[in-house]
Image: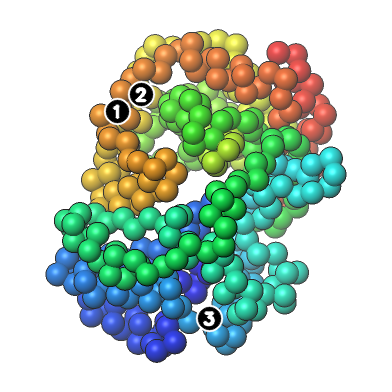
């Protein structure tokens, strides 16, 4: 669906659709996650009426013939061939963190986001259309957002083009979410990489989008920061962050090291990933574990906490200066929370995070919980066994 999002309609070929969009001075893109799907058009303001008509056609009447589906299936094959190691590592995190339950049932968050190659032959136009009808065309789970236009104009256009949609199936069934329980675990995958580095990630569970963990976790991620060993910039690029100072500047073999978060409706992950040559992957794993343990034992310093909170507020506010980011933020917040939180309220929440909150967050995450350990690369033999890493954290 993501690849086919703007591939034309029954009355417009892909070329004609793109030509029409170009005449409006516009660009389009689509993106999908495990929980949400985004269609976007960015056009010159005088052409918004025509653009909304095109958006309607792309969402409600896309070209879903067998020829288009087969063409996109070939693209999926090429995507698998060119998938970067960081994406494979991220998929491994989901698979390991939300493993099968005791009865063998694969959990939703533990499924691959990308269509497995072995399943491609079973994918056809009928299956794609069924998925679209069941998941993308329900008005109760659809948000139309915009930036750069008057709200009343948006409401009028939304009613004109999408107001006829009806609720599909039983409304109560649409609101049911099958929760995925964190299990923790290990996932190691031998993968030829262009640079020869082994990527390792270590993570623990957090609450999801609706949890009080959200803002403190974002502050903690900014505090740890990180990046790659090469940077053409100075302190403004985050080189005063903890992982730059205590990992990248300390160990010559550390090619990259950075913190990450992954949030979903009912659950989330917080962790650190790093890369090195295969013979140093064991050392990298130990360094990741040491930095996570330190967060659960010691409170962070006042100076680095203040810097992290200021940097997080700066990142949020400067990102929202972009109309593309602004409209997406509006849409996703309303889809997730039913309302949009103002920037002042958001900044207040960030300011209220203190050292004790961060330490308690990490203690809650790592104490009594199995870690999630993932490694991807040409050589994963030096990555410690999952049981050994579990023992490290068991000492806490």
User: In this rendering, would 264 be left or right of 276?
Assistant: left
> Residue at coordinates 18% horizontally, 61% vertically from top-left?
153
Identify the residue shown where x is 24% and y is 59%. Answer: 155
* Observer able to see residue 108: yes
Q: Determine the image quadrant of residue 24.
A: bottom left
Of 116 and 266, the residue lying toward us? 266
Secondary structure under the numbered disc 2 in the rendered image: helix
Q: Which residue is mark 2?
A: 349
CA–CA distance in space, label 3 to label 1: 43 Å
* Residue at image coords 18%, 57%: 152
Quickly name the residue at label 1: 345
Residue identified by numbered label 3: 64
Query: Where in the figure is residue 220, as x and y percent of width and height?
Result: 47, 25
Q: Are marks 1 and 2 in contact (CB under 8 Å)?
A: yes
In screen coordinates, is 112 left or right of 167?
A: right
At mark 3, the secondary structure is: loop
Outermost residue toward the right? 103
Measured along the vertical axis of the image, is residue 362 above or below residue 231? Answer: above
**Above-or-below relation of 90 to 152:** above
Q: Nearer the viewer, residue 248 or 300?
A: 300
């Amino acid at each position: 669906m993501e690849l086919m999002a703007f591939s034309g309609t029954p009355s417009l070929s892909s070329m004609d659709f793109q030509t029409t969009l170009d005449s409006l001075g516009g660009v389009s893109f689509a993106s999908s996650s495990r929980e949400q799907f985004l269609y976007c058009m960015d056009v010159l303001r005088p052409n918004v009426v025509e653009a909304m008509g095109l958006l309607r056609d792309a969402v409600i009447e896309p070209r879903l013939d067998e020829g288009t589906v087969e063409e996109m299936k070939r693209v999926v094959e090429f995507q698998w061939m060119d998938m970067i190691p960081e994406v494979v590592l991220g998929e491994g995190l989901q698979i390991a963190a939300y493993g099968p339950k005791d009865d063998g049932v694969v959990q939703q968050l533990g499924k691959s986001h990308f269509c497995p190659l072995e399943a491609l032959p079973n994918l056809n136009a009928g299956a794609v259309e069924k998925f679209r009808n069941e998941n993308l065309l329900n008005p109760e789970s659809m948000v139309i957002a915009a930036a750069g236009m008057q709200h009343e104009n948006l409401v009028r256009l939304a009613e004109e083009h999408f107001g006829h949609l009806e609720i599909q199936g039983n409304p109560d069934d649409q609101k049911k979410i099958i929760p995925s329980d964190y299990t923790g675990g290990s996932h190691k995958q031998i993968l030829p990489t262009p640079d020869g580095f082994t990527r390792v990630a270590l993570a623990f569970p957090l609450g999801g989008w609706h949890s009080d963990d959200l803002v403190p976790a974002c502050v903690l991620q900014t505090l740890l920061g990180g990046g790659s060993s090469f940077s053409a910039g100075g302190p403004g690029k985050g080189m005063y962050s903890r992982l730059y100072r205590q990992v990248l500047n300390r160990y010559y073999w550390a090619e990259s090291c950075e913190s990450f978060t992954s949030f979903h409706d009912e659950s989330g992950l917080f962790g650190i990933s790093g890369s090195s040559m295969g013979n140093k992957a064991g050392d990298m794993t130990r360094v990741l574990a040491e930095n996570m343990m330190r967060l659960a034992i010691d409170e962070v310093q006042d100076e680095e906490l203040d810097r992290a909170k200021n940097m997080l507020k700066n990142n949020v506010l400067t990102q929202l200066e972009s109309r593309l980011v602004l409209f997406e933020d509006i849409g996703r917040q309303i889809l997730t929370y039913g309302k949009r939180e103002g920037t002042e309220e958001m900044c207040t929440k960030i300011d209220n995070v203190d050292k004790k909150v961060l330490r308690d967050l990490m203690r809650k995450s790592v104490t009594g919980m199995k870690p999630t350990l993932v490694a991807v690369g040409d050589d994963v033999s030096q990555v410690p066994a999952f049981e050994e890493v579990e023992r490290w954290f068991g000492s806490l």
